[in-house]
Image (cartoon, rainbow, N blue to C red):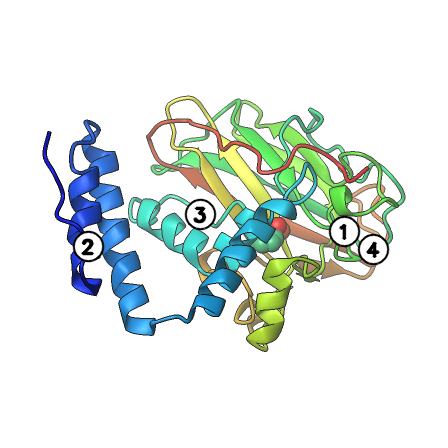
Amino acid sequence: MSSTPLIGSETDVTPAVLGAMAAAPDARLRAVMESAVRHLHAFLLETRPSEEEFEAALRWIAALGHHTDEANNEVVLAADVLGASTLIDLINNDGMQGETMSALLGPFYRGAAPECANGESIARSPTPGAQLHFSGRVTDVDGRPIAGAKLDVWQASPAGFYENQDPEQADFNLRGVFHTDKDGRFAFRSVRPAGYPVPTGGPVGALLRAQRRRPMRPAHIHFIVSAKGYKTLVTQIFCDEPAALADDVVFGAKQQIAADFVPHHAASARHPGMEPPFFTCEYDFVLKPGPSTYPVPPISGKRS
Ligand code: BEZ
Ligand code: FE
């Protein structure tokens, strides 16, 4: 059995911990944990927290867990406001093959949304706001249509709440699953989303206030677009002004996924049943070859 020398000073701790972890058989776990410990110790030696500061930091981390339940995921929210989720997104998705740019999943994705026919509305309870017709195609990087692609769609209401946060909205309001037709086309109706503040009642909100940060997200609609043989695309389509895009508390807005939401001030035969003023948006998603894995939902239900 190898023995680690006893700790005598600050500089003994990092090699002792690295030595204790060195026999992990999983090479990736070994490499990731070695790097994590090196950076963590370097950070502590640089910032030299007091014992009170360290205890406060541990309480903040524990509070992330206490504020996480079936309707809110404070751990994901913390990763988002610290820029970690967007960094992970960009490390894994560079958009270099012509595929649509991705964006972070966020804490409000629920699986098992109702399956919808093309053209159906995802407003399942009275949802005040301007109507929206959203349509487009899903293609591969050479522009060939992908038939049967699945689009998992979710968005906040114009009042700025996801249905799981809001007792006024029906279960799964503004959420739905669509499939492309033989030409790769899809369409749905909804309401134009508005920007909204991320939840600020927990430890993440306390941090944002201490840092004098605005908790806003620009208006957007979330999509997970998937098809067998193609890399699953997790993204958001933005419909806000440039100033709002630049003021995203989770650093998720990208120019490449900002779309034109066209206002219509009169009824139009092309859009029967849409009450003016309404908006239309046409957006084509491009998938590249890859694994069609699916994200695990960070929440499962509505606040009871
Ligand atoms: C969202 O877009 O749903 C979201 C993303 C990050 C934090 C909070 C909300
Ligand atoms: Fe969102």
Q: Which label's residue is closer to the chain start, 3 or 1?
A: 3
Q: Which label's residue is closer to the chain start, 2 or 3?
A: 2
State the mark number for residue 129: 4
Residue type of the residue flagged with mark 1: Ser
Residue type of the residue flagged with mark 3: Ser
Dot 1 alpha-carbon crowd within 10 angstroms: few under 14, some 14 to 19, many 20 or more: many
Dot 3 alpha-carbon crowd within 10 angstroms: few under 14, some 14 to 19, many 20 or more: many
Which marked residue is nearer to the observer: mark 1 or mark 4? 1
Residue type of the residue flagged with mark 4: Gly
Q: Front-most of 126 and 47? A: 47
Residue type of the residue flagged with mark 2: Ile
Answer whether labels 4 and 3 touch (C-beta < 8 Å).
no
SS at circle 2? loop
x, y (%) of residue 68? 63, 44
> How far is mark 4 from mark 2, CA to CA?
64 Å
The residue that appears at 86% across and 44% down in the rendered structure is 167
Answer whether labels 2 and 1 touch (C-beta < 8 Å).
no
State the mark number for residue 131: none
**Residue 188 versus residue 245 in the image, above or below:** above
SS at circle 4? loop
x, y (%) of residue 282? 60, 48
Residue situated furthest bottom in the rendering = 212
SS at circle 3? loop
Answer whether labels 3 and 1 touch (C-beta < 8 Å).
no
What residue would you read off at disc 1?
A: 157
What residue would you read off at disc 2?
A: 7
Q: Which label's residue is closer to the chain start, 4 or 2?
A: 2
Q: Which label's residue is closer to the chain start, 1 or 4?
A: 4
> How far is mark 1 from mark 4, CA to CA?
8 Å
Confirm or reject: label 4 Cβ below 8 Å from ligand 2. no
